[in-house]
Amino acid sequence: MDYNLFSNFLNFKNKLVVITGCNSPLGNAIAKFYLDAGAVVVGLDLVSKKNNFIFYKCDITKEKNVDKIFNLIFNRFKKIDILINNAGKAIFDHFEKRKTKDLDDVINVNLKGTFYCINSFSKLPSRNKKRNIVNISSVYSVISPDPKIYSSGDRKSSEIYGATKSGINQMTKYFSVHLAKKKIRVNSVSPGGIYNLKNPQRKTFIKNYSSRNPMNRMADVYEIVGAIVYLTSDTSSYTTGHNLIVDGGMSAW
């Protein structure tokens, strides 16, 4: 194998990477990888936190705000190579208690916000013929949560969360077709349950989830990052419109 060729496939040096929802555990892990790989990382979120990357406050549910921020980034760096749509909204009340505002909040972030970011990114001029978008979806975009893994007090995944993540999968397919002429590849990653190292899930939930999973455990956050890295690298140069499920086999049965 030509290892120099292989290293070029995974070369992110001086790439400009924009990550929405950068304050989340996954967002931080994504940012850390690209920083370590030599990329310039710009994080977008509602609140500034101490980090090692460039930060812009951005409410992705506001179309004009998104356009403004993307143009500010472009004017400063003259390019955006990679967009990771990681920002997401979840609610956990029982569906019988669902309020219209709950539905609107999740739809506004997960669907409208993702659309606004893709649209703003795609409108920017570029000399780079290798641009990428990765949308973060969920295993619950393709299967329904198993009620048996939840106990009283657990944060139960909602119907509207899964519905919006399914919408992200469809949006991924749509834009992969319509942005192909601009040389922009569009893919999504659907993670299974990720173990939260800083704020661990309840022991009963971890046990129940793991017993339902063929690999008998939850995911490590960097196992999800690996899928994102693949889809934004030249190793996946012929991959677009794909939803990569990284769930330890959860959706296989």
Image (cartoon, helix red, strand yellow):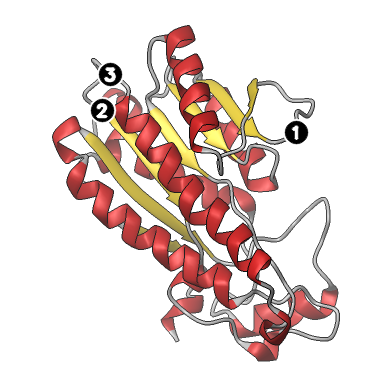
Residue type, mark 3 in image:
Pro
Residue extending farthest bottom: 148
10 Å crowding of disc 3: few (<14), some (14-19), many (20+): few
> Which of the two residues, 190 or 78, is positioned nearer the viewer here?
78
Q: Marks 1 and 2: which is nearer the front?
A: 1
- Residue 9 in view (yes/no): no
Residue at 73% x, 25% y: name it.
Answer: 51
| Residue 30 in the image, given as x and y percentages of width and height | 57, 38
Q: Earlier in the sequence, mark 3 or mark 2?
A: 3
Q: Which mark is residue 47?
A: 1
Residue type, mark 1 in image:
Val
| Residue 45 in the image, given as x and y percentages of width and height | 65, 35
Relative vertical location of residue 198 with respect to residue 96 in this rendering, above or below: above
Residue at 31% x, 32% y: name it.
Answer: 122
- Horizontally, is 10 left or right of 180 in the view? right
Q: Which mark is residue 130?
A: 2
Relative vertical location of residue 246 with respect to residue 38 in this rendering, above or below: below
| Residue 217 in the image, given as x and y percentages of width and height | 65, 71
Instruction: Kindly check if marks 3 and 1 are in contact, taking CB atoms under 8 A apart as contact.
Output: no
- Horizontally, is 30 left or right of 184 in the view? right
